[in-house]
Image: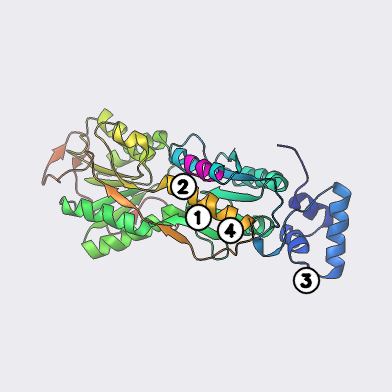
Amino acid sequence: MDSRPTVYDVAKRAGVAASTVSRTFSRPGRVSAETAEKVRVAAAEIGYRHFGTSAGVSAHRGTRMLALFVSDIANPFYAEVIRGAHDAAATAGYALMLCDTRESAKGERQAIERALGSVDGVVLSSSRMPDSGIRMIAKQVPTVVLNRVLPDVHSVVVDNPRGARRAMEHLGSLGHDSVTYLAGPEESWPDGVRWRAIVEAGHELDIRVRRLGAYMPTVRAGLAAAEDLLQRPATAVIAYNDQMAIGLMRGLQAAKVRVPGDVSVVGFDNIMLGDIVSPPLTTVASPLHSQGSIGVGNVIAMAKGARPSFEPLVLPMRLVVRGSTGQRRRNRTSPALGTTKVSGSAERASTSTDAGSR
């Protein structure tokens, strides 16, 4: 990508906030004439060009190019999201630009700013930016957010509370009276939603819950979580995502802990790897292809002038039961875990209760 100046460069030059720059071009009536003139002069001096219009809907510029931003292209979670987005874009006659932000809010913001003049719409999947940054982007170009809810930006999410509830009900039906949740990144919006749903289900189902983490959503992090779990025994675990769950199983098995004989494990997302590991992973399945295709379809409609809905579109989740969960064996002792009794209600190892911005 090129290094065209951004609203942040204009803001620095004019000595104002970036949000003021955005309002100057998208909602000029909300900025004083003096400030607006200062911003326009600064923009002209550094060669900044604004492409958006007000209300978060830009005029259709005819580039027929869209941008999809993902936080980690190496994460298998995004494979079907990308495929769904590509299929929808191709069907509508659009090209799709794919950008990997590498779990960096700053890198994501910079990449989006550089892409704005080249695309008719933006889809943000699991954005790491704060809400204010996303709102600023949405004022300049049609924007759809996946896996996160913002009150004034169109979003497509999955029914995380229902999915977490189904996982808890499944483990409870197998006799588990305590569950440990392995938390994802603190910036993750779904992480906070899932944890709150697990706590609520624990109260209703009389299952004690605790939280360990936060961890990165990777297999390597799951291996590290296994070491933590060996110090704090459990009979059942729900991991933030499938990659973490797979790493956890590998770590437990290396320590001679049986899955599901000693510990039952549930993941989230239903990535392809979950069906080929041993034992196959029980998981809460997300409609990943649909997320990508619906997100792109909606941003195309907005680019053509459709009025965006700010009510989140919620897609269903379902529990896929495989071999990593099993009946709890009462009063058993594992050579690595010891007696698997978990105490404490809604206990967690990390210091913050809610997830961050995503």
Spatial separation of the CA atoms under disc 4 and disc 1:
10 Å
- Image quarter (top left, top right, bottom left or bottom right) of the N terminus: top right
Spatial separation of the CA atoms under disc 1 and disc 2:
8 Å
Residue position marked by numbered label 2 in the rendering: 185
Residue contact between numbered discs 3 and 1, judged by CB atoms under 8 Å: no
Residue position marked by numbered label 3 in the rendering: 29
Q: Which mark is residue 356?
A: 1
Magenta stretch: dominant secondary structure = helix
Q: Secondary structure at mark 3?
A: helix
Sooner in the amino-acid sequence: mark 1 or mark 2: 2
Sooner in the amino-acid sequence: mark 2 or mark 4: 4
Scheme of image coloration: rainbow
Mark 4 vs mark 3: give the one in front. Answer: 3
Spatial separation of the CA atoms under disc 4 and disc 3:
23 Å
Residue contact between numbered discs 4 and 3, judged by CB atoms under 8 Å: no
Spatial separation of the CA atoms under disc 3 and disc 2:
39 Å
In this view, 142 is above or below 236: below
Q: Which mark is residue 131?
A: 4
- Where residue 96 appears, x then y in whole percent? 59, 41
